[in-house]
Amino acid sequence: MKHLLSAADLSRDDAILVLDTAAELAAVTDRSVKKLPTLRGRTVVNLFFEDSTRTRISFEVAAKRLSADVINFAAKGSSVSKGESLKDTALTLEAMGADAVVIRHGSSGAPHRLATAGWIGGSVVNAGDGTHEHPTQALLDAFTMRRHLRDGAGDLDGLRVAIVGDILHSRVARSNVLLLRTLGAHVTLVAPPTLMPYGVESWPCDVSYDIDRVLPGVDAVMMLRVQAERMHAAYFPSTLEYSRLYGLDARRMGLLPPHAIVMHPGPMNRGMEISADVADSSRAVMVEQVANGVSVRMAVLYLLLGGMKEEI
Ligand code: NCD
């Protein structure tokens, strides 16, 4: 495989190879010297047209731990703010010899365009495109679930996962539904009707509007941020009403089975989709999700750029 654009690009075997490779690479992260020579001399460009904290830093750390040269390109402060097109930006990166371009863009489909238009020769990794997909987030989430709920090996067969909140605007939800299904898990989406995507009936998952009925039957619950920046209309009456009906607070967390974990891709709106005490509780694995993101992104770059196995 040359690019990673969608979670649907991954077969079960591909996904398990990424997770297994990430597990091997995670061991490197525990050493005092965290660097491998695997991608020495290769260039990875982080091309971020949208704001990001975790994802951009995570890709940067991942590439650096594999000894790649990393160029961080933020649209703000670049010629993009002077009106330069994606094509001209891509041709510039190509002229600089990028072996991989990690792209986050506000338009759904931008990474696909970059990968297929013939502007660049390297690999393209989708780091979030509009409301479409975020495949490496789904991989790090699967990695985190596998560690906590499946002894860190194999697939996620039979695992039950609830994804709760602003599904309509969430690329994290779509990629997770696709990958979790590939790995054998069963997903229930929970949201107010206004934040459920059109055509969700055709997604490979169940749909519910009642979080209290879903929580007792799941192994993991993933809370999503209410993405106000993508909302150009009122989708719910008030913040208070949203958190009362769909937020995860201590009472609701008590409905989960004792082994279940609480996840969130970040950034969190504390007090909105998740209460501060739940976010800080021992069942919340957000910090681990971030750490696992580095291992998973190392695995993706390593596999796409053809690192040498024996160097791990
Ligand atoms: C998510 C994103 O940007 O899609 N965050 C992330 O990558 N960790 C979710 C969000 O912004 O709410």
Image (cartoon, rainbow, N blue to C red):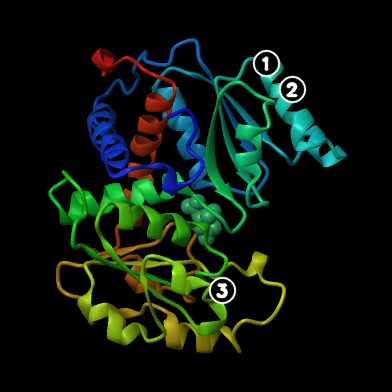
Mark 3: which secondary structure?
loop
- Residue 228: x, y in percent? 63, 69
Do residues under tags 2 and 1 come within 8 Å of each other at their CB atoms? yes
Q: Which residue is mark 3?
A: 198
Sequence-first tag of 2 and 3? 2
Quadrant location, the N terminus? top left
Q: Which residue is mark 2?
A: 92
- Residue 23: x, y in percent? 24, 35
- Residue 189: x, y in percent? 39, 73
Q: Would you call the spot at circle 2 few (<14 residues within 10 Å), some (14-19), or many (20 or more)?
A: some
- The residue under the point 32% across, 56% down is 180
Do residues under tags 2 and 3 come within 8 Å of each other at their CB atoms? no
Do residues under tags 1 and 3 come within 8 Å of each other at their CB atoms? no
- The residue under the point 38% across, 25% down is 302
Left or right, residue 91 beside residue 97:
right
Q: Within the image, what quadrant is residue 161 found in?
A: bottom left
Q: Would you call the spot at circle 3 few (<14 residues within 10 Å), some (14-19), or many (20 or more)?
A: few
Sequence-first tag of 1 and 3? 1
Mark identifier at residue 96:
1
Q: Within the image, what quadrant is residue 276 found in?
A: bottom left
- In the figure, 273 relative to 135: above or below? below
Indicate if the residue with disc 1 has its beta carbon within 8 Å of ligand 1.
no
Mark identifier at residue 250:
none
Q: CA distance from mark 2 to mark 1?
A: 6 Å
Under mark 1, the amino acid is Met
Residue 165 visible somewhere in the drawing: no
- The residue under the point 57% across, 22% down is 122
Under mark 3, the amino acid is Tyr
Indicate if the residue with disc 2 has its beta carbon within 8 Å of ligand 1.
no
- In the figure, 69 relative to 154: above or below? above
